[in-house]
Image: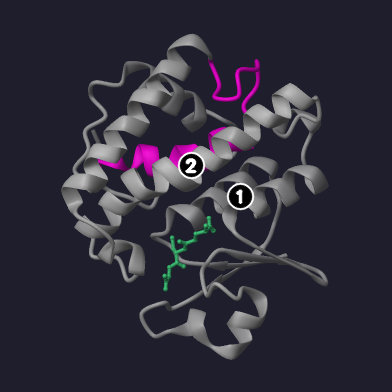
Amino acid sequence: MKLYDLEISGNCYKIRLFLAVLGIEYTRIPVDVKAGENKTSEFLEMNPNGLVPVLTDGATTIYDSAAILVYLAKTYADEEWLPGEPIQLSSVVRWLAFEQSEVRYGLCRARAKLLNMPTPLAQLGTLEDSQALARQALDILEKQLTQNDWLAGGLKPTICDIACYPYTAMGPEGGVSLQPYTAVRRWMEKIESLDGYIALPGQVRI
Ligand SMILES: N[C@@H](CCC(=O)N[C@@H](CS)C(=O)NCC(=O)O)C(=O)O
């Protein structure tokens, strides 16, 4: 298995984290996005969006972090990581979608702006708008995690916890403090104590 990867990317980190929690060995292929390695014709063959992460597993190529998490869960993980029961499954998908919208355009974009990340997302809109959206996302996460141990509402973590964790935990790198969010911080600690947990690429905390 090969992961086309960018160290500082939270989207890539999600995959590294899940692979580590599952204890799956893989080869990391660093992609130099500043040098445009993600826009070569070979790379665009794998992902027409020209974005990392991309995972290859034998003859299979998957792109988009949410799709990769689904693939890994269905292929290599216990059912609890992606429950098949319709209501639980729809809940997991809802939080995966939340991550790709509110979290991406709030927490992830604020960080991309403050760290001058080499991605068009960093050029979009203002820092203030990104931080406001980030706080709205945190309010929603806080409410859900005050009432539930895990985002999808079950007794065990699922792939939507893995998906929402990185950019939430790296919020302070986008100038968004996590101090007011007690339930979010408690949830982060539980993820950080999962067997196989690996450290985040970010540096700024709280
Ligand atoms: N929806 C995609 C987003 C991936 C994404 O935004 N990747 C960024 C790194 S976090 C990237 O490849 N940026 C390089 C560029 O935009 O040129 C996913 O979840 O995989």
Asked if one can make out residue 102 in the rendered structure from this viewpoint, the answer is: yes
| Residue drawn at (49%, 24%) of the image | 190
Q: Which residues are magenta?
A: 149-172
Say if the magenta span includes residue 126.
no
Answer left or right for 205 relative to 146: left
Q: Amino acid at mark 2?
A: Glu
| Residue drawn at (55%, 21%) of the image | 150
Which label's residue is closer to the chain start, 1 or 2?
Answer: 1
Picture quarter with the N terminus: bottom right
Residue where numbered disc 1 is placed: 66
Where residue 129 appears, x then y in whole percent? 22, 46
Q: Amino acid at mark 1?
A: Ala
Circle 1: element type: helix
Query: Mark number for residue 99?
Result: 2
| Residue drawn at (36%, 33%) of the image | 137
Residue situated in front as seen by the camera: 204 or 193: 204
Circle 2: element type: helix
Where residue 160 appears, x then y in whole percent? 58, 36
Answer left or right for 104 relative to 50: left
| Contact between labelled residues 2 and 1, with CB atoms less than 8 Å apart | yes
Residue 189, picture quadrant:
top left
Asked if one can make out residue 158 in the rendered structure from this viewpoint, the answer is: no
Question: Neighbour class for label 1 at 10 Å: few (<14), some, many (≥20)?
Answer: many
